Amino acid sequence: MKKVIVFGASGNVGRNVVKELVQHNYEVTAVVRTQEKAQQLSELTMNHVIADVQHKETLCGICDGFDIVISTLGKSVSINDKSKSSFYDIDYFGNKYILDEAKKSKVKKFVYLSAIHAEKYQHFLYFKAHHNFSELLITSDIDYSIVKVPAIFSAFLDVMDLAKKGHLVTLGDGQCKTNPIYEGDVAKVIVNAIKTPFSIIEAGGSRIYTRKQINELIQQSVNPTKKCRHVPVFLVGLLLPFIKIFDKNTYDKLSFFLEVTQHDVIAPMVGDSSLEEYIRMRVSH
């Protein structure tokens, strides 16, 4: 039985990865920051390590004895996340520290969850961090798989909160397209990638939506008494420099959102799950 260590295990994708690995009879260890997060995963695996990539001394020897490393580690894109660390701190340096340990421990395989088209938008910190780590992994001596997705369903939980309050807006005309993928489907791609040597795999959901369609779907499902309004892109662009002065964390996230919503971000259709059903289940709970 191959031994796998999963970083970012308590996140929306990471939790599904742990579940998928267990179903495929891997011996799984979850890396979490607190005992509370370990307890939340206890129904899936009792094997855990408490460590924090922002304190790299806690990672010393963490990959010893493991055949495979999977990292879904990344700073949350949620506006509600108030952590001070940057995308580069977590998505690049955090994963770099993991890779350094994996190399020392002679791990055979490293699977990394990244963002599609990261190489095109390196002037944004989110994409730059993902691209630069991917390049670092590719040039290492470890067999790698890099899974690149456009967006996961849980990224729209903040959008649902805005819709409940009647504050949901669409930037511009909302005609740019994307095909988000359910995190459980991403987990299947990641686990399958273990057996695909030296690969870059793009994976999206089974349906393509415009940004306007996604927002209207969420608004109608969450609070149909309210309407989703449109805000001109140039107006948000004018506000961003002022936001940067006072809150760099929020600036990085809003810059990221503004950029991705103004381009088609579409990956090969892999996922089976429906965004409509995901939203319905969230609303019913």
Image (spheres, rainbow, N blue to C red):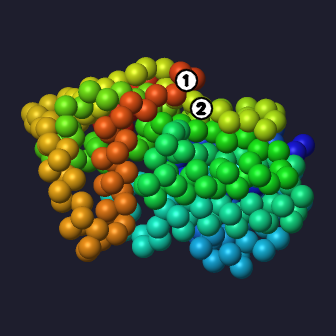
On screen, residue 115 above or below 133: above
Q: Quadrant of the C terminus?
A: top left
User: In the image, which disc is placed on residue 268?
Assistant: 1
Name the quarter where the N terminus is drawn: top right
User: What residue sits 68% from the left and 75% below the top?
Assistant: 56
Left or right: residue 177 versus residue 93 is left
**Front residue of this view, candidates 124 and 167:** 124
Q: Residues within 10 Å of mark 2 (few under 14, many from 20)?
A: many
Element at badge 1? loop
Residue holding disc 2: 202
Residue plotted at (63% across, 77% down)? 55
Disc ID at residue 213:
none
Above or below residue 65? Residue 142 is above
Q: Position of residue 167 (x, y in %)?
A: 15, 47
The three-letter amino acid code for the residue at tag 1 is Pro
Whether residue 225 appears in this view of the structure is yes
Q: Residue at x 87, y 45 (%)?
A: 2
Q: Is residue 122 left or right of residue 172?
A: right
